[in-house]
Image: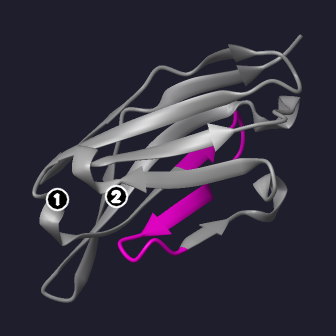
Amino acid sequence: QVQLVESVGGLVQPGGSLRLSCVASGSISSIRAMGWYRQAPGKERELVAQITSGAVTNYTDSVKGRFTISGDNAKNTVYLQMNSLKPEDTAVYYCNAKRVRFGRVNDYWGQGTQVTVSS
């Protein structure tokens, strides 16, 4: 099992910045990727950014150039630096870990943290 604990989000003005963190614990040696998803009211959960164990990153188009995902292996932590925030970034953000065992991918989720971008 993998446990994920996210930092608290918050209320940010448009154009502002916020950094989320997610600490992984438990059976982390088999984690092959970690990332952040978000879900806005009435919408499906979507991938925001992901980083693999080989430090390869990918982002959804709407956040490219504004968000940066990074990892600190020593701290078992992944970060999401969010800059130039827009109201449409408002959502519950979920940390995700993909653990591979016996050829199967298992998804683990954090509890979710609210990010609200509003003036």
Quarter that holds the C terminus: top right
Q: Hey, what amino acid is under mark 2?
A: Ala
Residue drawn at (42%, 54%), measured in percent from left and top?
71
Residue position for label 2: 97
Q: Which one is closest to the eye, mark 2 or mark 1?
A: 1
- Front residue (pair 14, 55): 55
Q: Is residue 58 above or below residue 36?
A: below
**Is residue 45 visible in this depiction of the protein?**
no
**In the image, residue 35 lies at what x, y percent?**
48, 56
In the rendered structure, which segment of residues is drawn in magenta? Answer: 37-56
Secondary structure of the residue carrying numbered label 1? helix
- To which quarter of the image does residue 18 belong? top right
Q: CA distance from mark 2 to mark 1?
A: 9 Å
**In the image, residue 13 lies at what x, y percent?**
83, 16
Residue drawn at (70%, 33%), measured in percent from left and top?
41
Q: Is residue 33 above or below residue 42?
A: below
- Front residue (pair 108, 21): 21
